[in-house]
Image (tube, helix red, strand yellow):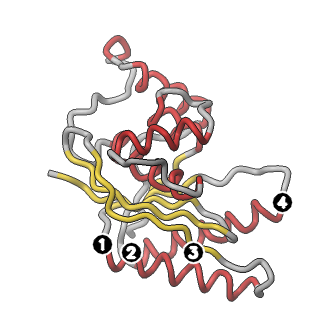
Amino acid sequence: MSVRVLGIDPGLTRCGVGIVDVAGNRSASLVDVTVLRTDPGLPLELRLLAISRGIERLLDEHQPSFVAIERVFAQHNLRTVMGTAQISGVALLLAAQRGLPVTLHTPSEVKAAITGYGSADKKQVGTMVARILGLAEVPKPADAADALALAICHAWRTGASGGTLPTIGPDNGGGLTPAQKAWRAAERSAGSSVAPRSLKR
């Protein structure tokens, strides 16, 4: 059994979207990856429309079972944060319209899931994504690799693919792998939950 996850690295100028199939043994394969781009000189509403149409096309074409989006954090560049939050809202809306469960993952959660280290840099994440998916080279730009990492992270951390990933809880701490221990540390620091948050009502 495998599950299809669509990951989104939200951004107004560059929005990474990656789709992977993840089997019960946690092996992952690439379905599609792209970076949706908009011209900073365009009116905001037209940029949002362009990204929306791109995400919508990929959702309808690939029919994922889950959507994973990078959680937005405050940064020094307010304009960048606003654009990221706006695209996240567009993606949340499109997923909700299709009844798809959505989970927001922090960057540290994704890094820990992919590399076993919550403070890994983008190069390390990209290298591991390529290795996991059996790709000859790292997906570029970094937005593409990040989107794929989000999708893989979601399937691995939530057990969405039906695999035998141990529950990350207080009763099995002694049996955690180094990567799972890193997941736990990332969850504690982010105050997040392992369970996917469904937008179904």
Q: Is residue 106 left or right of residue 95?
A: right
Disc 1 to disc 4: CB gap under 8 Å: no
Q: Earlier in the sequence, mark 4 or mark 2?
A: 2
Q: Earlier in the sequence, mark 3 or mark 1?
A: 1
For mark 1, does the 10 Å Cα neighbourhood hold few (<14), some (14 to 19), or many (20 or more) residues? some
Disc 2 to disc 3: CB gap under 8 Å: no
**Amino acid at dot 4:** Leu
Q: Residue at x 60, y 37 (%)?
A: 190
Question: Which dot marks residue 59?
Answer: 2
Residue with the most extreme top position: 174
**Amino acid at dot 3:** Val
**Amino acid at dot 1:** Gln
Q: Is residue 60 left or right of residue 106?
A: left
Residue with the most extreme left position: 1
Between the residue at mark 1 and the residue at mark 2, the CA separation in whole angstroms equals 5 Å
Q: Position of residue 13 (x, y in %)?
A: 69, 70
Q: Which residue is mark 1?
A: 63
**Amino acid at dot 2:** Leu
Q: Earlier in the sequence, mark 2 or mark 3?
A: 2
Residue with the most extreme front position: 136
Disc 4 to disc 2: CB gap under 8 Å: no
Disc 1 to disc 2: CB gap under 8 Å: yes
Q: Nearer the viewer, residue 98 or 76?
A: 76
From this view, report whether residue 55 is shown above or below residue 129. below
Q: Position of residue 123 (x, y in %)?
A: 58, 39
Q: Is residue 2 left or right of residue 92?
A: left
Q: Position of residue 65 (x, y in %)?
A: 30, 63
Task: Indicate which label's residue lies in the foreground, 3 or 1.
Answer: 1
